[in-house]
Amino acid sequence: MTGLTQDEVDGGVEFREACAVLEQEHRSRSRAWASWGDYDRKQFERQCSGGRAAYPFSSRHTNAKQAFTDCFGLQRRLGMSGALHHAGLPLEGRHHSGADDAWNIAALVLRILSSEGSSQARR
């Protein structure tokens, strides 16, 4: 699903180290962050529980899937690719690739912000 090969997994870093990199190199604890749904947030919380690793993020999390649903008045939450289609945006890169998904989610967050700005301007 992610497109990673076993060699890439074997050559990667341990989860604890990856969390430290997020915190040290990207200052993740001092920044707001978003994910498409709550799965990623909850997965990090589970993997960090019990002292296995320090949770690398701030508590300022936005569920971008819910924000998109609310912004566009949708009856149900769309997956990321469905939301891109709904917003008239292309799916960049490979779906479920971390860097590509981050890029696509950022595009959706910008669309939410531009839609909210447009609706406020009309008021």
Image (cartoon, rainbow, N blue to C red):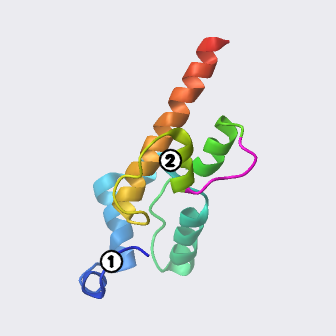
**32 vs 80: above or below:** above
**Does the magenta portion include 17?**
no
Within 10 Å of disc 1 (Cα), the crowding (few <14, some 14-19, many 20+) is few
**Mark with earlier residue (1, 2):** 1
Q: Nearer the viewer, residue 12 or 47?
A: 12
Residue at screen point 32% across, 77% down: 4
Instruction: Let me know if residue 95 appears in the view.
Output: yes
Within 10 Å of disc 2 (Cα), the crowding (few <14, some 14-19, many 20+) is some
Query: Where does residue 103 sit, x and y in percent of width and height?
Result: 38, 50
Q: Which residue is mark 2?
A: 84
Where the N terminus falls, by quadrant?
bottom left
Residue 47: which disc?
A: none
Element marked by disc 2? helix
Residue at screen point 43% across, 66% down: 96
Q: Nearer the viewer, residue 84 or 120?
A: 84
Q: How many marks?
A: 2
Q: Residue placed farthest to the right in the image?
A: 75
Q: Which residue is mark 1?
A: 4
Q: Which residues are magenta?
A: 74-79
Nearer the observer: mark 1 or 2; the answer is 2
Mark 1 residue type: Leu
